[in-house]
Image: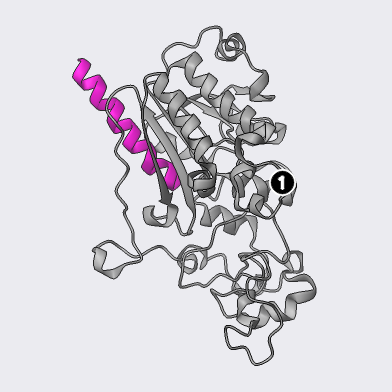
Amino acid sequence: MRSISLFSGCGGLDLGLHDAGFQTILASDLERLCAESWRRNMPAVPFLGGRIGTWTRAEVASALGGTIGEVDLVAGGPPCPPFSKSRFYRKEKPRALEDPNGWETIDGYLSMLDWVRPRAFILENVKGLAYKVHAEALETIIARAEKLGYKVTTDVLNAADYGVPQIRERCFVVGSLDARIEWPKPTHSNKPSSGLPPWVTAGVVLHDLDTEENASDEGHFAGGQHHNLLREVPPGDNYLYFTEKRGHPSPIFKWRGRYWSFLLKLSPDMPSWTIQARRSNNMGPFHWRNRILRISEIKRLQTFPDSFDLAGTLEQQWRQVGNAVPPMLAAAVGRSIASAIDSRLRDAA
């Protein structure tokens, strides 16, 4: 099944879709660095650069060798800052479709649906897209897709429910020209009564990378001026440990006075918290050994293959992985899409 990838990043969504039976026939991203990561890992896939708002249908066809042909899926996650939680704090910046970049990327995605007319589509974004404050943006996406004939469904999925060792909630909008797409059933749960295996923990996937000889790696120093405080934070906790409300005998911080990820530390007995797109020395999650995670570790927590070769500096590699859809989650959604498409093809035959 043929898939076009938009806002491809380093390819996390596409790796999962490949496992679900799709073949990416065109990838795209504004960042040239992402094109290099694709060249290293999936060199046969054509890559289209530049801003999506400047593309024409003819340019898309040209990138595909002169003709678009039949496409089964368009998939991608428009850049999330306009819909992110940080915009609640950055009052000087516009939100959602009022942000010019937010409008350009969403409009560009929907224009691609119009040009290509794939059998199905996946649009992924941060959980904030599903917030009431962003209802107009989500309604715009749904209305325009339905006008093109798609049956649209939206939901917020937690990657941990699908075997990813990370609590990462993301909003998915999917559509099909045929029957409505059913969401994949969770394979894991944090509720013992569910009958499903428990969430996969960070300790399980990082144990062979967590060696004593590497524990004090100076290149991964965490906490900055608060490093000594970080060492006191219990695994699975954050700066709130040092607040009066939590009963600390000598409170240092005010309750909810910082970003929640400040001095946030992983627990080996829990999934990771959401891996952010920015590598920071005071915003976690950090390793329970009180250091910044390594690229090899965040690849594991995002379910990328160990052998996946990323281009760029350490910070640039981190951003690519942190921005990605975990391939294991993408595969679960992709299999639901593939099942719907396979059903249609069988019925047609």
Which residue in the protein does label 1 denote?
A: 316
Amino acid residing under circle 1: Gln
Q: Nearer the viewer, residue 190 or 111?
A: 111
Q: Secondary structure at mark 1?
A: helix
**Image quarter of residue 58:** top right
The stretch of residues the image draws in magenta is 327-349
| Residue 53 image point, x, y percent | 65, 22
| Residue 329 image point, x, y percent | 43, 46
Q: Nearer the viewer, residue 15 or 277?
A: 277
Residue 331 as seen in the image, left or right of residue 58: left
Q: Using the image, determine if residue 103 lies above or below residue 67.
A: below
**Residue 77 visible from this viewpoint:** yes
**Image quarter of residue 332:** top left
Q: Residue at x 53, y 73 (%)?
A: 236
Residue 117 as seen in the image, left or right of residue 180: right
**Quick one: quadrant of the C terminus?**
top left
Q: Nearer the viewer, residue 148 or 191?
A: 148
**Image quarter of residue 344:** top left
Q: How many discs mark residues in the rendered view?
A: 1
| Residue 231 image point, x, y percent | 67, 80
**Outermost residue, right direction?**
225
Q: Residue at x 63, y 85 (%)?
A: 244
**Residue 309 visible from this viewpoint:** no
